[in-house]
Amino acid sequence: MESSFFKLDNLSISFGGIKALQDISFSMNKGEIFSIIGPNGAGKTTLFNCISGLYKPDQGNIRFKGKSIENKKPDRIAKMGIARTFQNIELFSHMNTMENIMLGRHIHMKTGLFRGMFMWGKNSFAAKEEVQHRERVEKIIDFLELQSIRDKFVGALPYGTQKLIELGRALALEPTLLLLDEPCAGMNSEEKQDMIFWVKDIQTDLGITILLIEHDMKMVMDISDRVLAINFGEQVTLGTPEEVQQNKEVLKAYIGEEG
């Protein structure tokens, strides 16, 4: 696998004098599933916010495909090929499945909403472009087996299904690096197992590299190529799932935290 597809060097960020992250460093290979674990408040989501451009780190460097991204805005980072999901579902409940996933295509649309309003007709550029984007979304719906609820309002759908739709919207961005922030949070055991299958399929069938935050240790150990453990914003250890699981500091920090 290609090395240094993604690299993070000595990343640090503080809020009001509190060090949320301190000297975090790791690199990812193209095509792998890399997981980050740690207790609540360890700094995992803060790390994702730095990568996706929501936070600007105090120091350190974030490189994606050889380019620094730590000072870029979220939309530019998304256009470079990094998409993410969130801990809390960020869907529009009054819109259906198709419409929510279509929102993920916005960075690829040449015709803006205002301009599109004045470009009516089946042969207009706006109309042709929408057809192309809908075809792309239909493929995602087929891939995630969401055909039966494509026209249903997401607010009325089960929690696990909504998480899957949010995953679909992230895939609509056409990422080469996908950040998944606790994709199994709030799910029952059956939904968690389904999510594990989807994440593996995204890696193997779509060839997307995955950076994962997850409290469910079974999922982490089942699907991860490598695991980084952090606590109080600092690195504890980095290695294979087996190596991390046997680390004494990890056992001390995370006993009773998983799940």
Image: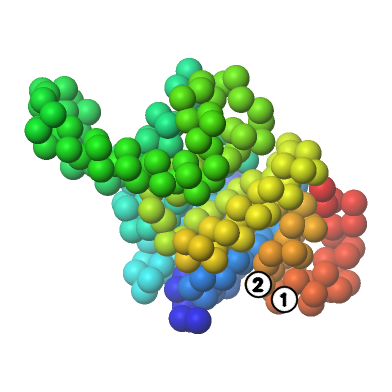
Q: Which residue is mark 2?
A: 225
Q: Residue at x 38, y 61 (%)?
A: 69
Q: CA distance from mark 2 to mark 1?
A: 6 Å
Counting residues from the start of the chain, the first of labels 2 and 1 encountered is 2
Q: Position of residue 243 (x, y in %)?
A: 79, 77
In this picture, residue 43 sits left or right of residue 140: right
Q: Position of residue 250 (x, y in %)?
A: 83, 66
Note whether 182 is above or below 101 in the view shown.
below
Q: Regarding mark 1 in the picture, which secondary structure is present there? A: loop
Note whether 202 is above or below 40 in the view shown.
below
- Residues at circles 2 and 1 in contact by the CB criterion of under 8 Å: yes
Q: Amino acid at mark 2?
A: Asp
Q: Residue at x 67, y 67 (%)?
A: 224
Pick whichever, 153 or 49, lies toward us. Answer: 153
Disc marking residue 180: none
Note whether 52 is above or below 243 in the view shown.
above
